[in-house]
């Protein structure tokens, strides 16, 4: 069961603080799926304004954490090393539970279809086993760093 710590994640993803939104990869299969986690801290900078009286993790950041999880599966393939996966779109996003400081966000993304540099994934974020967010996401691999 391959796990990745922060340093190993940073060797795959280009994201850095404050925009690296996964803390640990629990397991993955390169090119197929990844499971990660985000430990939501009260010290997150976005909580200063979202919302001061009732801290809630913004839904777009949950989607970004899911996209980063999918990017681990995609960019861990040897042929994609050093590339960037850009967010292409979101369909059918549903938010079912708020995510608050102290929650552990369980992130799961399965790549479902790929054609050239474009691909799609099914993503689910959970807190304590309850679905917080589900969505279909799409991505585009940068082609500027291709070799050959």
Image (cartoon, rainbow, N blue to C red):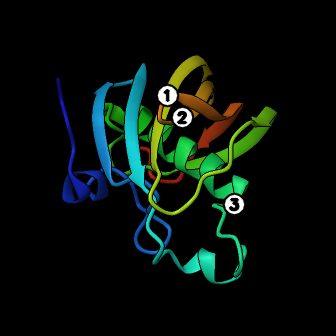
Chain-order first, disc 1 or disc 3: 3
Identify the element where label 3 is drawn: loop
Left or right of 148 on screen, residue 59:
right
Image quadrant containing the C terminus: top left
Residue placed most toward the observer, 18 or 132? 132
* Residue located beneath label 2 in the image: 126
* Residue located beneath label 1 in the image: 129
Seen at 61% across and 76% down, the residue is 47
Left or right of 86 on screen, residue 77:
left
- Rate crowding at label 1 as few (under 14), some (14 to 19) or many (20 or more) other CA atoms within 10 Å: few
Seen at 32% across and 44% down, the residue is 81
- Rate crowding at label 3 as few (under 14), some (14 to 19) or many (20 or more) other CA atoms within 10 Å: some
Identify the element where label 1 is drawn: loop
Real-space Cα separation, disc 2 to disc 1, in angstroms: 6 Å
Q: Which residue lies furthest to the right in this view?
A: 92
- Rate crowding at label 2 as few (under 14), some (14 to 19) or many (20 or more) other CA atoms within 10 Å: many
The x and y percentages for residue 72 are 39, 39
Nearest-to-viewer mark from 2 and 1:
1
Marks 2 and 1: CB-CB under 8 Å?
A: yes
Q: Which residue lies furthest to the top in this view?
A: 112
Left or right of 56 on screen, residue 12:
left
Q: In the rendered view, tell whether residue 10 sits above or below residue 68.
A: below
The x and y percentages for residue 38 are 42, 51
* Residue located beneath label 3 in the image: 58
Image quadrant containing the N terminus: top left
Seen at 60% across and 52% down, the residue is 99
Identify the element where label 2 is drawn: strand
């Amino acid at each position: 069961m391959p796990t990745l710590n922060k340093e190993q994640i940073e060797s795959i993803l280009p994201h850095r603080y404050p925009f690296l939104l996964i803390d640990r990869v629990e397991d993955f299969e390169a090119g197929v799926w990844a499971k990660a986690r985000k430990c939501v801290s009260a010290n997150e900078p976005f909580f200063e304004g979202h919302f001061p009286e009732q801290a809630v993790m913004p839904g777009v950041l949950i989607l970004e954490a899911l996209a980063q999880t999918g990017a681990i599966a995609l960019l861990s393939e040897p042929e994609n090393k050093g590339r960037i996966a850009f967010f292409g779109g979101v369909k059918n996003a549903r938010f079912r539970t708020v995510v608050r400081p102290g929650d552990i966000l369980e992130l799961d993304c399965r790549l479902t279809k790929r054609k050239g540099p474009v691909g799609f994934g099914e993503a689910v974020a959970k807190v304590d086993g309850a679905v917080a967010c589900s969505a279909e996401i799409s991505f585009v691999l940068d082609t500027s760093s291709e070799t050959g």
